[in-house]
Amino acid sequence: MTTSVDLVVAGSTVRVLVDPAPVTAPGVPTLGPSVGEYPCYDTASYATMTDDEERNQRFRAALARVAAGRVVLDIGTGADLLWARESVRYGARRVIAVEAMAESFRRARTWLAEPGLADRITLLRGVSTDLDIGARADVCVAEIIGSMAGAEGAAAVLTDARRRHLTADATVVPHRCVTLAAPVAFRRLFADAPVAFAADALPYLRSVFAWHGAPFDVRLRVTDPATEALLGDGQVVEVLDLNGDLPLEQRRSVRLTIDRPGTVDGVLCWLRLWCQPDGKPLDALRVASNWASIYFPLFDSEHPVEAGDALDLTVTSTLGEDGVHPDYHLDAVLWTATGTRSARHWSPYRGGGFRRHVVHRLLFP
Ligand SMILES: C[S@@+](CC[C@H](N)C(=O)[O-])C[C@H]1O[C@@H](n2cnc3c(N)ncnc32)[C@H](O)[C@@H]1O
């Protein structure tokens, strides 16, 4: 059962297809907009991250190794001042924490009343790329990693940090993040669940549209997708080596081989993250974490495929209009026994139009 809800955004009305049922059980596929790359964090989104043990144990293990006696920079500390506080717990000599969002900064500041924090943590309000932090840090913890690894601007932010905020041999946590992609059909990601935005996604749609000033084709974030919808193994389409070569823009081409019969209309992308070179990676499709997966539409309808068919995919990330957050460009060719089909999708950070693809026309009727 789905219903339509009217959202009023910047004086205009947007109709949204919604599943009115509350999300009752973990593991049920749900749809929302991708918002991590926008300044739309609220109490609930910080709580989800602060409670994300799969993520946090990996960050803690890395900080336990590198923080003691060092100057740590926490980029995007969030409302809970989380990695700044943890760095102090692991013996950091000094921590500089920066937060871009005013309300998150205000809430982070209240943590400084806790014993032993105010004399070791300096909290700065602003975007790291605009700030002068007045020191060089030996360690940088930057949890600005998206469900598409680079979507929150980590490449540009860390490139700037290495140039202006960090010592020459500084260690960055996390260590490496990649984005994987696999061929899917959108509807099948939801198994028996309705194909519609979850009711609790509406406030996020409203705030990301309000930030933008108008509705646009948001990236589609699928939590707990039905993994049987993936018709082949994931291949790496984006790489962020945060302690190595970190290009601001990149292009990767892969062949996604179909391993069983089904239908394909796009790709599902998800994050794999290492906090330390020798640590166990977090694969966002395999463990429950705050990261979800992102569906990108390619074709206007589902195309039947057989085992042995292939989807050739090129994913290009270029700097978006703010010079920090990437735009993603997907180019694909589907090879089947019945013919070859090409497709292209552009997912800019900002702008790019509204209801350009059939899937966005379905979700915004
Ligand atoms: C994914 S949240 C992480 C919050 C917290 N560090 C954690 O791990 O739970 C990213 C946070 O970084 C902030 N942020 C993103 N880019 C930033 C930048 N370049 N400078 C300062 N804050 C930034 C956002 O406002 C948001 O609060």
Image (cartoon, grey):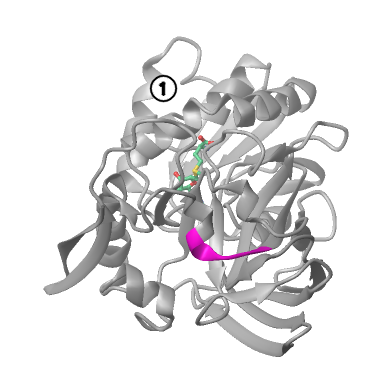
Picture quarter containing residue 162?
bottom right
Camera-nearest residue between 32 and 318: 32
Picture quarter containing residue 263?
bottom right
- Label 1 element class: helix
Picture quarter containing residue 152?
bottom right
Query: In the rendered view, does 22 fall on the left or right side of 313?
Result: left
Residue tagged 1 = 112
Residue 185 is a magenta residue: yes
> Residue 36's x, y, as percent?
47, 52
The magenta segment is: 183-187
| Residue 165 visible, this angle | no
> Residue 241's x, y, as percent?
79, 53
Residue 313 is a magenta residue: no
> Residue 169's x, y, as percent?
85, 44
Q: Is residue 150 above or below residue 29?
A: below
Camera-nearest residue between 286 and 169: 286
